[in-house]
Image (tube, rainbow, N blue to C red):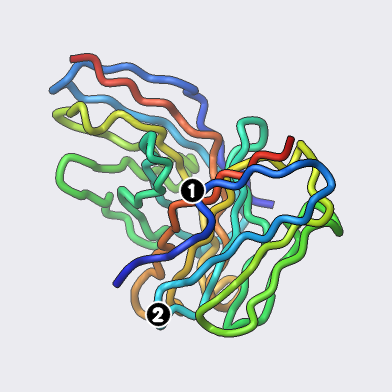
């Protein structure tokens, strides 16, 4: 079974600074996707960024970027120029690729990292 | 599009009562997922459907839980009888069939269930 581990229960960063959230995963599959979701106090799950395992290039979405190390099974999220609105729970998630089993599949989540932005 | 719709947003019930949570997926999506979020266990997949057919229900905790999808625009998650340990936030998500692009799962706002 796949597992996702987020070793940082809580992180704190000064506004405008950069912070990196860690995530490791375990899988025997070769085709999979990785995601970072943000959950603000409203509890709405918001997709921040996604990465296909077959792509070597790290995904980037504005101030959010990932460091995907496939051999090490590591998938960290970097938030640059942190803003107060970035304060939330961040979840790393894994999904098996469609080629691995056909069709879509459910997400396996880590336990989350609570990100605090200090003004 | 209105996004994934869940009702009710909050539910408070007493132990032993039947609880029904409802979900309307995004139109055109043919995958529907039910997740549960608790402090102890985090976010976990309960069951998912493809074209209204249950594909994987291995995450359903026990026989007290059941889920149905009678048509493409409606799904229910029922707990009977409910127990205090069922207290959690229940999310519904939907996605399109994987193709040449990644199928993003869109989440509903969740239903916060409290069983007294």
Q: Quadrant of the C terminus of chain B?
A: top right
The foreground one among B31 and B13 is B13
Q: Report the chain holding disc 2.
A: B
Label 1 vs label 2, nearer the camera: 2
Which secondary structure, mark 2?
Answer: loop
Residue occupying image coordinates x 64% and y 68%: B76
Chain letter for mark 1: A
Element assignment for label 1: strand
Instruction: For label 1, count other residues whose C-alpha is less than 10 Å away and answer few (under 14), some (14-19) or many (20+).
Output: many
Check the image and report above or below for A3 versus B53.
above
Q: Nearer the viewer, residue A113 or B38?
A: B38
Q: Is residue B42 above or below residue B11?
A: above
Residue with the mark numbered 2: B27
Where does the image place residue A97, in percent across and percent down from the top left?
Answer: 51, 67
Residue under circle 1? A93
Residue A9 left/right relative to B20: left
The residue drawn where x is 43% and y is 20% is: A10
The answer to whether residue A90 is above or below residue B54 is above
The quadrant in which residue B64 appears is bottom right
Q: Position of residue A26 (x, y in %)?
A: 59, 45
To the question of a shared chain for discs 1 and 2, the answer is no
User: Where is residue A25 drawn, in percent x and y?
Assistant: 54, 43
Of A69 and A94, the residue lying toward us: A94
Residue A118 occupies which quadrant of the picture?
Answer: top left
């Amino acid at each position: 079974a796949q597992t996702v581990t987020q070793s940082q229960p809580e992180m704190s960063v000064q506004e405008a600074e950069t912070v990196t959230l860690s995530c490791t995963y375990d899988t025997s599959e070769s085709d999979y996707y990785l995601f970072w979701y943000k959950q603000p106090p409203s509890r709405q799950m918001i997709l921040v960024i996604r990465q296909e395992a077959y792509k070597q290039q790290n995904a980037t979405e504005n101030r959010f970027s990932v460091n995907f190390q496939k051999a090490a099974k590591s998938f960290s999220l970097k938030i640059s120029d942190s803003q107060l609105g970035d304060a939330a729970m961040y979840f790393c998630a894994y999904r098996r690729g469609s080629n691995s089993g056909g069709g879509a599949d459910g997400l396996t989540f880590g336990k989350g990292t609570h990100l605090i932005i200090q003004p | 599009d209105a996004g994934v719709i869940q009702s009710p947003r909050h539910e408070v019930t007493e132990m032993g009562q039947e609880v029904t949570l409802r979900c309307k997926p995004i139109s055109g999506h043919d995958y529907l997922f039910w997740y549960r979020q608790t402090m102890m266990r985090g976010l976990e997949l309960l069951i998912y459907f493809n074209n209204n057919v249950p594909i994987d229900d291995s995450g359903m905790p026990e026989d007290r839980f059941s889920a149905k999808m009678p048509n493409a625009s409606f799904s229910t998650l029922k707990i009977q009888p409910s127990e205090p340990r069922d207290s959690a936030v229940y999310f519904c998500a939907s996605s399109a069939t994987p193709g040449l692009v990644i199928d993003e799962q869109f989440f509903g706002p969740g239903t916060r269930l409290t069983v007294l």
